[in-house]
Image (cartoon, grey):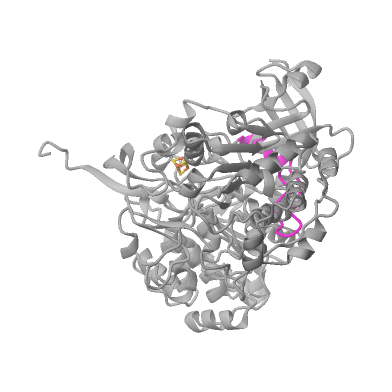
């Protein structure tokens, strides 16, 4: 209206928190965020958001934002001009490249940054420096799921859309705390379950909200999901319930796969998982009876020694029962960060170019060498887990990391921090002086999602645009501008004036995004990859077959890997995961008053039985010690956890941070840390 204050603006953006990818209008007056308003046409969320998307934005205006480059002087940082910081970085980078070679350098991209920024980070590593040492934090979460899907169906993403989950007859959730980690997807399932008769089965070692709502909830022994998954699959095959037409026409490797299930009998599964055989049989029956099954899984599956194999077993079960390439069915590894899907999609992986084309493929490499100039090594680079080891070994001298708090979220923190101290030169680019930035030589001030343009890709492969809501604070800059500036100082000649031009380059090189343009993503429009040159996108994958040479999926035999064993004194199992209100390491949510007023700090969940045995109450301060380190945290007594299993939210910070306890053991295929396999001993430090 005419009365409306002209300073009030309404701008479309995409949530900066989880992989659901909610989009909404942000109302602002100057730098003040007035409200968040989801729209009916918001493709992933409609008119819903969760508490983080709605109230988690104060961090953007936090006084703790870094607004000028910082350069280390002894034990402290001093503010510097951009020119000085960038000159220092370029001279150090050039020196490292000439003295020790490109592979002495490493690059960490960010699942909080845009697709365009991930694209540029890997282009800097490969095209300008000449190394494949580039990774991102999907290595800490869903890379095992990507492997499980690559092995079986050929694309490492959700096979359908959130609407398919909603319309499934049966939803099976394995190792995902969906209502806290992906709240808006959980809301869809809750609604379908309550109103439309959708069946819900949940497997988790901790009784979470979805478990409480489920028709059937099982709590297997930690690290044994693959055993019941394979036993159920075998049972379905033995009963003659497999989808024969689907298997004949669309799947390879049936015989060999069925032979590999030989030992996975119901009796064996009951013994290993601790779940009654009758319950497992009723699960098999329910899956058989449902016309469509969608399986949702997350870190409870992937963060184990056998995370890739369990993910593979899920996909095998879906193939056997014909639950691919039809609405309401399929595989849904739920992506954690807002752009964890996109960070890998756009090539921030040591073995893949954008669109997952392999680095080792000569033709693909030649295509990128021609486009970018320079030579790209054929050998895949180091992943972030291997980078830490290579620093310890003296082979990796330099790291450029943006937007990830690796010094808090990687496992075995004491070991990671020692590595950071050994680096010759460490550049960290972030909003805040994170734990990781404390180890840096130069810290560069970046801009959050609200201060830039670009695209994010959510868990259902949906690419969405964000529009700039605010000017970058102080002298902070969007990550893509900083990367371009560094590349050009190192001799490149990049001239991107807007992220749309970066996307255009990616689309011209990667067939997966052939038809992606900013025009096709205008406003609330979105595209789900693969996107054909004419702009046709793919809400539901595999309708015309699987992306292998013969168009057929592959059953892939896998075996159970026993979880880590610990000495007897470490008698308590620690589980970890999210809280609804806080996000990961908490750099953003702990700086948002709307969130901290609700949940100011985290706690350790302890069962009533353990509380009784050890004399613990709400508020008792305990120390947990694993073979790798220790944490101090206050207890909360709850029946969500079982006797000798405790739960420490991963949002705990400082001396409560979970990763002082975790080890360097990792998934045997992807090096994803086995975060979920830790045992500790517990001591009481203060009664209350
Ligand atoms: Fe949506 Fe996830 Fe953001 Fe919540 S955190 S508003 S569910 S994208």
**Residues in magenta, as a range:** 652-675
* Name of the residue lying farthest toward the left: 2
Q: Which quadrant of the view contains residue 273? A: top right
In the rendered image, the quadrant that contains the N terminus is top left
What is the x, y in percent for residue 243?
65, 57
Residue in the picture at 66% in, 69% down: 381
Vertical position of residue 271 compared to residue 474: above or below: above
Q: Is residue 194 left or right of residue 46?
A: right
Q: Can I make out residue 553 in this image?
A: no
Q: Which quadrant of the view contains residue 534? A: bottom left
Q: Is residue 667 located in the magenta-colored stretch of the structure?
A: yes
Q: Can I make out residue 509 in this image?
A: yes
What is the x, y in percent for residue 549?
61, 76
Q: Is residue 519 left or right of residue 313?
A: left
Q: Nearer the viewer, residue 66 or 261?
A: 261
Vertical position of residue 229 compared to residue 221: above or below: below
Q: Is residue 627 left or right of residue 307?
A: right
What is the x, y in percent for residue 613?
81, 18
Q: Is residue 86 left or right of residue 380?
A: left
In the rendered image, the quadrant that contains the C terminus is top right
Q: Nearer the viewer, residue 671 or 74?
A: 671
Q: Nearer the viewer, residue 411 or 426?
A: 411
Residue in the picture at 49% in, 69% down: 512
């Amino acid at each position: 209206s005419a009365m409306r204050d002209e300073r009030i603006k309404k701008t479309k953006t995409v949530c900066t928190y989880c992989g659901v990818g909610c989009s909404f209008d942000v109302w602002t007056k100057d730098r003040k965020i007035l409200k968040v308003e989801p729209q009916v046409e918001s493709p992933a969320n409609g008119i819903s958001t969760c508490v983080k998307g709605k109230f988690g934005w104060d961090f953007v205006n936090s006084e703790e934002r870094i607004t000028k480059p910082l350069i280390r002087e002894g034990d402290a940082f001093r503010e510097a001009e951009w020119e000085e910081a960038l000159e220092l970085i370029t001279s150090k980078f050039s020196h490292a490249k000439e003295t020790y070679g490109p592979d002495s350098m490493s690059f960490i991209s960010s699942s909080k940054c845009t697709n365009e920024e991930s694209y540029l980070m890997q282009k800097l590593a490969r095209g300008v420096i000449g190394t494949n040492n580039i990774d991102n934090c999907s290595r800490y979460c869903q890379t095992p799921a990507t492997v499980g899907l690559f092995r079986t169906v050929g694309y490492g993403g959700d096979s359908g859309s959130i609407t398919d989950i909603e319309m499934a007859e049966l939803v099976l959730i394995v190792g995902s705390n969906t209502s806290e980690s992906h709240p808006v997807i959980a809301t869809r399932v809750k609604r379908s379950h309550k109103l439309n008769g959708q069946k819900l089965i949940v497997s988790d070692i901790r009784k979470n909200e979805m478990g409480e709502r489920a028709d059937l909830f099982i709590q297997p022994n930690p690290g044994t999901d693959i055993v019941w998954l394979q036993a159920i699959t075998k049972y379905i095959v033995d009963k003659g319930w497999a989808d024969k037409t689907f298997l004949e026409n669309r799947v390879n490797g049936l015989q060999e796969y069925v032979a590999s299930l030989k030992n996975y009998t119901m009796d064996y599964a009951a013994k290993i998982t601790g779940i009654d055989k009758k319950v497992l049989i009723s699960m098999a029956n329910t899956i058989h009876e449902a016309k469509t099954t969608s399986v949702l899984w997350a870190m409870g599956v992937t963060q184990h020694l056998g995370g890739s194999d369990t993910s593979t077993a899920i996909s095998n079960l879906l193939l056997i029962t014909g639950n691919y390439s039809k609405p309401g069915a399929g595989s849904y590894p739920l992506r954690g960060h807002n752009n964890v899907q996109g960070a890998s999609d756009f090539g921030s992986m040591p073995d893949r170019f954008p669109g997952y084309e392999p680095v080792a493929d000569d033709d693909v490499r030649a295509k990128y060498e021609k486009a970018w100039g320079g030579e790209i090594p054929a050998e895949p680079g180091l992943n972030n887990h291997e980078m830490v080891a290579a620093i310890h070994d003296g082979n990796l001298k330099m790291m450029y990391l943006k937007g990830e708090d690796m010094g808090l979220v990687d496992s075995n923190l004491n070991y990671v921090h020692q590595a950071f101290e050994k680096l010759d030169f460490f550049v960290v680019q972030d909003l805040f002086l994170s734990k990781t930035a404390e180890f840096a030589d130069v810290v560069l001030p970046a801009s959050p999602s609200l201060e830039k343009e670009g695209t994010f890709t959510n868990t259902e492969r949906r690419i969405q645009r964000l529009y700039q809501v605010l000017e970058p604070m102080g002298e902070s800059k969007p990550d893509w501008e900083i990367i371009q500036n560094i590349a050009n100082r190192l001799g490149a000649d990049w001239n991107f004036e807007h992220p749309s031009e970066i996307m255009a380059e990616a689309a011209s090189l990667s067939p997966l995004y052939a038809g992606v343009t900013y025009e096709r993503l205008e406003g609330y429009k979105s595209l789900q990859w693969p996107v054909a040159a004419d702009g046709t996108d793919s809400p539901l994958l595999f309708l015309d077959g699987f992306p292998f040479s013969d168009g057929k999926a592959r059953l892939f035999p896998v075996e159970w890997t026993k979880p880590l064993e610990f000495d007897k004194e470490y008698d308590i199992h620690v589980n970890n995961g999210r809280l609804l209100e806080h996000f990961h390491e908490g750099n953003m949510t702990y700086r948002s008053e709307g969130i901290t007023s609700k949940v100011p700090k985290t706690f350790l969940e302890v069962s009533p039985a353990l509380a009784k045995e050890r004399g613990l109450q709400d508020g008792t301060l305990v120390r947990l010690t694993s073979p790798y380190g220790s944490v101090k945290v206050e207890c909360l007594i709850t029946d969500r956890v079982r006797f000798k299993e405790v739960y420490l939210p991963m949002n705990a910070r400082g001396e409560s941070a979970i990763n002082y306890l975790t080890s360097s053991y990792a998934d045997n295929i992807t090096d994803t840390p086995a975060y979920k396999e830790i045992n500790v001993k517990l001591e009481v430090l203060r009664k209350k």
